[in-house]
Image (cartoon, rainbow, N blue to C red):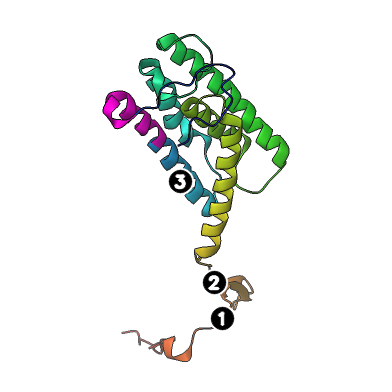
Amino acid sequence: MPAGLGFTLDYAPRARLTPHDGPPFWCMYAMHVVFVTTLVGAILIAADGFAVPAMMFLPAIALGFVVPLIFPQTRMLPATATGDGWLGGLVDGIVGLAVGVFSGLWIRLVRGRGTDHWSTPALVALGCAVGVVLGWQPTPLWTALSWIFAVIVAGVVSRATPHSESPAVAETPNDDGAPVMQPASPMPPEEVLPVPPMQEIDPP
C-alpha cells in the first residue's frame, strides 16, 4: 500500500524497504496483507447485508502496532523526530491510533445515519488499522478512500449476487377454524401425491 502519501512536516521519510532488507520488509508485507484481507472480508460481509463487526480489524491493528516496535522502518513516515528505536515505533503507533479514531468519527459525522452496514465502531476500527499500518499522516485520506472503496464494491457485489427468496405463505383455515400456513402458490397436480382411502377395521 502507498505509505508515502501524507505530510512529512519537515521529518525526512524513512528509506523504502525492499526484499533485500530481509525481516523488516516481510513484516511490513505481512502488515499490509493482513489489512487488505481484512478489508476484503468486511466488503463481503457488507455485500451479504450484514453489519461489519469492528472486532475483525483487531488482528490488523495489533500487528500494525506491535511490529513497528521491533522494526520502526516498516512505517515510511515518522510521526516525530524521536528516532528509529522502539520509542519511535511506539510514538508512531499511538499517534496513528489517535488520528485513526478521529478519521473514523469524521466519516461518521459527514456520512450521517447511513445504511452502508458500517457502524461507528467499525469506522473507528478501520481508521485505527490504517493509522497503525501507514502512519498518521496519510490516515485521514486513506481511511476515507478505503471506506468509499469498500461501500462501492460491496454494493456492486450485492447487486451481482443472486439472493434466494423464501416462498410466500398464506393462511387458510382448517376444519376447526384455526389458520394453517400454506404456500401461496399451489403445487402442480403432478406433484400432489394421492391420499389412500381410510379403511375401517371391524372389531373382533
Q: Position of residue 24 (x, y in %)?
A: 32, 24
**In front: label 2 or label 3:** 3
Q: Which residue is mark 1?
A: 185
Query: Which residue is rendered at x = 40% and y = 24% of the image?
Result: 74
Q: Is residue 105 left or right of residue 39?
A: right
Q: Which residues are magenta?
A: 18-32
Query: Which residue is rendered at x = 37% and y = 29% of the image?
Result: 28
Q: Position of residue 153 (x, y in %)?
A: 54, 53
Marks 1/2: CA distance?
9 Å
- Callout 2: helix, strand or loop? loop
Marks 3/1: CA distance?
40 Å
Towards the viewer: 6 or 176: 6
Which numbered marker is on residue 40? 3
Q: Which residue is mark 2?
A: 167
Query: Which residue is rendered at x = 51% and y = 64% of the image?
Result: 160
> Would you call the spot at circle 1 few (<14 residues within 10 Å), some (14-19), or many (20 or more)?
few
